[in-house]
Image: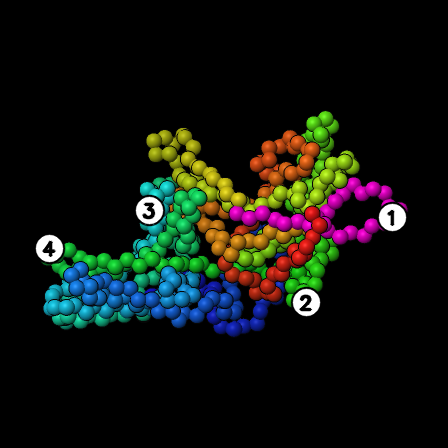
Amino acid sequence: MSLPGYTEFNTETRPAPQVNESQATLPSYSRRVSTVWDVPPAEQVHCFYLTAKKTGTRWLTLALTSRAASAVDTPTFYQGGDVAGNVKLDLEKEEMVDEITIALYGRLSIFSHSTSNFLYASQTLYSAAASEPQNTHIATSFLKRGVSIMSSITTNGIAERENYRLPPSFKDTEANVDVQYLLIVRVNRGGFKSGDKLSVPLTYIPLARPSPPSILRQLAYRENTPLVGPDGDPDGWKALASTHIKGTLFKSFPAEAECRVHVSKPLSYTRGAPIHLLISISCSNGQLLDLIGPQSVRLALVQRITFGDATQKARFSERLPAQLTVKAFERASASWWKFPSPTSASAPAPTTKTFAGELLIPEDLVPGCQILHYGHEYELCLYPFNVVGFTPSTPQKKPLLSERVGIVTAFAQAPRPLSYIPPRYDT
């Protein structure tokens, strides 16, 4: 049974590709690789059963081999892998079995009452019409002739055909969204006898990795040395558009500060890895600048969820816009500390403060996806300062600026990212 198999997933070992100094803008991730993916081995065997109601005897066994951490975990399959297994029947008495089928479903559930199948594939494992009569024992394997989980699918929408990359398995209780994959074995006894069904949930993980970072960034990771800033490593950082924060200081004096944010490139990040940040704050009001500290800066990773298809027209009127509902959830926030800079006793009072920061991406964060009438993506959002005595004119929950980023499941073909958060820093 073949799982998503991009032709790019070549497992032959070849020389690592050269790093391109000009980093591409989002999406800056790659599915073309030349080395083996860093995934667990397929060595866990999971067994599932159907039992007789009266005796409790196991009469159907489904065995799967997966890449899960243990045999008691949900069977886990990665893009480009194989599903191996077999189905075995051991009936207590002789009876007719017309057909045994195995089917794979991909289901999207929203708000617990709206369910849509975005994937369906099935195969007949046994047919009495095409096989020799069987009495009490039937065994069949779907190791080589199984159901295929494509890496992408095409559906017929109201307006046009849509192509989707298969989403990962996940359940989001906050957003009331559930994407699940089910492997279902059905036994049809024929006639008026009711059939039997064994349903097994699967975990599916797509594979994508970022492009390599700049050469200087890779060197810092490899040698565990400090990162080079934007001036010395322009290929390693993206400068976001500058933004101004306006407000009132001590309820009496108007005050304003300018913020310039740099984000580590490429703008696609692996789950469990840090996003490196720099922020420079310029202000002519010395009182406000003195009050701004690392704890004042609020930058978060925000997940934006959409329900509805913006490409489809309303059924009852072509003139009405498509319905689109958006929800936003903060999934992680950045930590900041003072960025060391040379000072001189004779130098004038500074008008700029610079802080270094990191945002650690949760290891269980769901990569961005779009399937049917559901989708979610991620943004880095900078919010107004949280400073005692300063009241910003912009609402605290409204971002001053945002930058779309990608979240992927595998690391780049480069040294692993390091965290530079000091063990203790002055806030």
What is the C-alpha distance between the residues marked 1 and 2?
34 Å
Where is 45 relative to 197, above or below? Answer: below
Which callout, 3 or 4, points to the residue nearer the camera?
Answer: 4
Write down the residue under mark 2: 223
User: The disc labelled 4 sits on which kind of residue?
Assistant: Phe
Which callout, 1 or 2, points to the residue nearer the camera?
Answer: 1
SS label for mark 1: loop
Q: Residues within 10 Å of mark 1 (few under 14, many from 20)?
A: few
Q: Residues within 10 Å of mark 2 (few under 14, many from 20)?
A: few
Q: Are marks 2 and 4 in contact (CB under 8 Å)?
A: no
Residue 388 coordinates in the image, percent (x, y): 68, 36
Label annotation for residue 116: 3
Q: Earlier in the sequence, mark 1 or mark 2?
A: 2
What is the C-alpha distance between the residues marked 3 and 2?
50 Å
Q: Are marks 3 and 1 in contact (CB under 8 Å)?
A: no
Label annotation for residue 192: 4
Which callout, 4 or 1, points to the residue nearer the camera?
Answer: 1
Write down the residue under mark 1: 345
Q: Earlier in the sequence, mark 3 or mark 1?
A: 3
Tell me where the magenta segment starts and ends, as one range.
331-355
What is the C-alpha distance between the residues marked 4 and 1?
94 Å
Q: Earlier in the sequence, mark 3 or mark 2?
A: 3
Q: Nearer the viewer, residue 324 or 326?
A: 326
User: The disc labelled 2 sits on which kind of residue?
Assistant: Glu
User: In which quadrant is the N terminus drawn?
Assistant: bottom left
What is the C-alpha distance between the residues marked 3 and 4?
29 Å
Q: Is residue 247 left or right of residue 285?
A: left
